């Protein structure tokens, strides 16, 4: 696959950017909420992990949990400019129904903030879940971090660059494993004006997760769809190769015929035949 540098039209480019931003703003994800079962788990809404109105998360807790459960902290996509945790009921149900505590976090967005504020939010959300894991019936030694698209960037960067957690007196050992879904990890130069403003320049290598891989990192599962025209799947290939070069454990999956939105929709009931993402994630969590 070509490198398509700067072509994340959410790292996007010109007319395609407008269309994709509109698509994400009117994503089919919220519509799925109407069909999602509300049984088998309870939701604790708007738990604050910081002082800003955007620094809150929703917690999905399985019913009848008897042993400390693994925790899955998820960051959604939206070009670091859009998104709401309440739209991801399908994600919460997909894993809470299998005995996993799921945290879905909002985080501050452009233009309110610039890079790296959303990474600081990610670290704060992770610190919140690690500190309160036992209180909610979770296992602080089994906290997994996942994300889709821009959220995958946040999840992977928390493992790639340990200083965000160190700044809050934490460390990367808090992360048992990382799952990146259709994520941008190596996407310079930027061409979209908003993204250039967001990241403080078109070619800042220090904004790239791949730049920070200089040693072993937490285990990762990196997945993409072969038909993704928003985030080049070669991002996944390059990131995995860099991780392996330093001895990190990394698995990759490329789902044939699946696009950028389809990959996250495949977690919803009725759409799971489109890609085995849910089962791959459950297997990865169980293995670690």
Image (cartoon, rainbow, N blue to C red):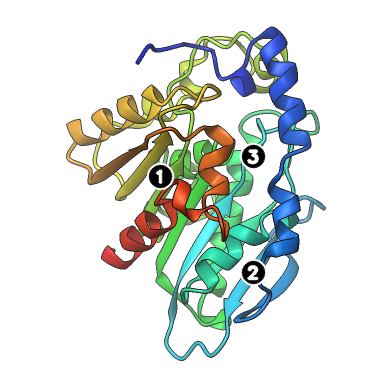
Q: Is residue 27 above or below residue 132?
A: above
Q: Secondary structure at mark 3?
A: helix
**Quarter-of-image position of residue 40:** bottom right
Q: Earlier in the sequence, mark 1 or mark 2?
A: 2
In the rendering, which numbered label is found on residue 59? 2
Does residue 48 appear anywhere in the picture? no
Position of 145 with respect to 234 (left or right) is right
Residue 252 in the image: state x and y as whole percent. Answer: 30, 40
Q: Quadrant of the C terminus?
A: bottom left
Residue 38 in the image: state x and y as whole percent. Answer: 68, 75
Position of 245 with respect to 13 (left or right) is left
Closest to the observer, 228 or 162: 228
Closest to the observer, 237 or 93: 93
| Residue pointed to by mark 3 | 118
Q: Earlier in the sequence, mark 2 or mark 3?
A: 2
Q: Residue at x 49, y 13 (%)?
A: 188
| Residue pointed to by mark 1 | 159
- Mark 3 Cα within 10 Å, few/some/many (few <14, many 20+)? many
Query: Label 3, label 1: how many angstroms apart (C-alpha)?
Result: 14 Å
Position of 240 with respect to 265 (left or right) is left
Q: Secondary structure at mark 2?
A: strand
Cβ–Cβ below 8 Å for labels 1 and 2? no
Does residue 16 appear anywhere in the picture? yes
Closest to the observer, 91 or 132: 91
Q: Earlier in the sequence, mark 3 or mark 1?
A: 3
Q: Residue at x 58, y 10 (%)?
A: 202
Q: Is residue 245 above or below residue 90?
A: above
Query: Label 2, label 3: how many angstroms apart (C-alpha)?
Result: 19 Å
Query: Label 1, label 2: how many angstroms apart (C-alpha)?
Result: 22 Å
Closest to the observer, 139 or 165: 139
Residue 282 in the image: state x and y as whole percent. Answer: 38, 63
């Amino acid at each position: 696959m070509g490198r398509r540098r700067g072509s994340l039209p959410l790292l996007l480019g010109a007319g395609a950017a407008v269309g994709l931003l509109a698509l994400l703003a009117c994503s089919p994800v919220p519509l799925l909420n109407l069909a999602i079962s509300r049984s088998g788990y309870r939701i604790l809404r708007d738990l604050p992990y910081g002082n800003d109105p955007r620094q809150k998360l929703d917690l999905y807790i399985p019913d009848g949990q008897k042993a400390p459960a693994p925790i899955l902290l998820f960051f959604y996509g939206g070009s670091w400019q859009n998104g709401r945790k309440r739209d991801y009921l399908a994600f919460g149900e997909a894993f809470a129904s299998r005995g996993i505590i799921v945290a879905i976090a909002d985080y501050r967005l452009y233009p309110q903030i610039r890079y790296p504020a959303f990474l600081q939010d990610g670290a704060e959300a992770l610190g919140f879940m690690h500190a309160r894991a036992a209180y909610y019936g979770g296992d602080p030694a089994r906290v997994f971090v996942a994300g889709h698209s821009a959220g995958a960037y946040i999840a992977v960067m928390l493992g790639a660059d340990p200083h965000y957690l160190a700044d809050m007196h934490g460390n990367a050992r808090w992360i048992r494993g990382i799952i990146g879904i259709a994520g941008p990890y190596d996407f310079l130069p930027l061409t979209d004006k908003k993204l250039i403003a967001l990241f403080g320049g078109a070619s800042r290598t220090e904004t790239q997760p791949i730049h920070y891989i200089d040693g072993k990192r937490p285990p990762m599962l990196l997945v993409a769809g072969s038909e993704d025209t928003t985030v080049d799947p070669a991002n996944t290939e390059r990131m995995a190769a860099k991780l392996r070069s330093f001895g990190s454990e990394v698995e990759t999956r490329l789902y044939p015929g699946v696009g950028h939105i389809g990959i996250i929709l495949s977690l919803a009931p009725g759409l799971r035949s489109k890609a085995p993402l849910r089962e791959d994630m459950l297997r990865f969590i169980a293995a670690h």
